[in-house]
Amino acid sequence: MTLALDDTIAAIASAPGGAARGIVRLSGPGVKSCLGRVLVALSRFDWDDCRFAHAFEATMALGRGFASLLPCEVYYWPTARSYTGQPVAEIHTLGSPPILEAVVRAVCRAGARLAEPGEFTLRAFLAGKMDLPQAEAVLGVVDAADPHALNAALEQLAGGFSTPLNRLRDQLLDLLAHLEVGFDFAEEDLPFLERSVLEERLAAAHASMDQLLDRMAHRRTAGELPRVVLVGLPNTGKSSLFNALAGHRAALVSDHPGTTRDHLELEVEFHGQECLLVDTAGVAADVLGSDCGPDAAAQAVAAEQARRADVRLLCLDASRPLHAWECQELAKPDAAGIVVWTKVDAAPADAVQAEETSLSCIRTSSVTGEGIAELRLRISEAILAARWSEASIVPGTADRCHETLRLASECLGRARDALRSELGEEFVAAEIRFALDELGRVIGAVYTEDLLDRVFSRFCVGK
């Protein structure tokens, strides 16, 4: 892909196929010259006096094969305040594919050339109008297949992904500046950062980096259903609740603890939200202090399912006191997900009142059906919330940046290790520089032509 900015490009910018209106876009220093050669009968328009964005009606000569002039509207941005940072024009006319192709041929004869895929957005990136994640978000908007994908792309285009990255870069640059001053003026009486403050700021930066990585790791691939996973001790009624939510007998139910040896998946829909409902084995025998729990293989599968959950249902047996493990899970901040009391039909009336005062709990009974409808509604709301709050990262950005951010996180981890082991602040500064280089690659502050070609070649012509 060419990085030249001194020529003028043109392409059809509207969607393929016939329509009432179509758009041909131009960008480059020769836009005014191209328009002046193809447009005729301008409505009292003075090119030299146009210093701001302007719209006007005109007619256009398409050349051989077209006997009549083509009526059109022209939107003209003569300054660097345009999308690409160059003079830009859009010719709006009839959305007939042969006519639009003829318009492109006419402006190319007048001095433009056909744009390459993504070249308009590439010029916007090179002009500093947007960073690389925002440029990729443009493609995400075009390719969005549902409202959730569109929302994620629009949020990234507005800086939802770039803002925390730029904030993190600023923090690391500030730390590096303090370290560099300490190296250059070690003998001076200057207020340098204390080691404890440096460690605290490095830890905060490292945590921010890992949060970004976690957002990417939990991002679902296109078409993958959100996972609603039931977790809890053996014999807490998870399988019975699974069947009640599913509306039919799908899981084996037994009073014997550890009956569920593997996980069970079922596609269900709650209030219009499709999901994958997952029943898992109970927690390990060593947690229970007995040998009646599921085996190690089933336990590993259950732990993996819980880790992948988009919505986690923590099942508590209302017919008995809480186990120590359950108390620990409830005490974890934001770890409980939706807390579900099962078997309330077999519990004393006041058995769960003390716990419900501080938790958002749902009382259920798979025997009487109590709370099942409310739980289905709560699950649908949680799925919707998870979709809106999950990583607002378009697929192309996630694929490109995951490894780079992982390397940056490793650099910050080594910087903290160097600080704790007292290897010297020179080693800390070196690792911070490496982390900054990786972050620069993510946002496009550091790039190669190969990287830009890989990003923008996925665009269609005209974007």
Image (cartoon, rainbow, N blue to C red):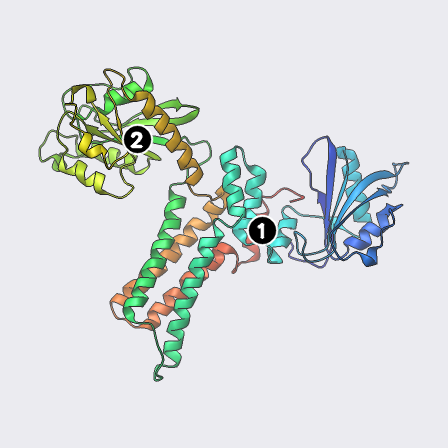
Q: Left or right? Give the position of 149 relative to 407.
A: right
Give me the residue at 58% from left, 45% from top.
138
Is residue 189 shown above or below 241? below
> Mark number for residue 229?
2
The 10 Å Cα crowd at callout 2, few under 14, some 14 to 19, many 20 or more, is many
- Residue underneath mark 1: 453
Q: Which of 426 and 47 is in front in this view?
A: 47
- For the C terminus, give its image quadrant: top right
The 10 Å Cα crowd at callout 1, few under 14, some 14 to 19, many 20 or more, is some
Q: Where is residue 422 in the image (x, y as percent from the top left)?
A: 26, 70
Secondary element at tag 2 = strand
Secondary element at tag 1 = helix
Three-letter code, disc 1: Asp
Give me the residue at 50% from left, 55% from top.
443
Give me the residue at 44% from left, 61% from top.
169
Quarter of the figure with residue 196: bottom left
- Judge depth for marks 2 and 1 and give the one in front: 2
Quarter of the figure with residue 415: bottom left
Q: Which of 379 and 279 is in front in this view?
A: 379
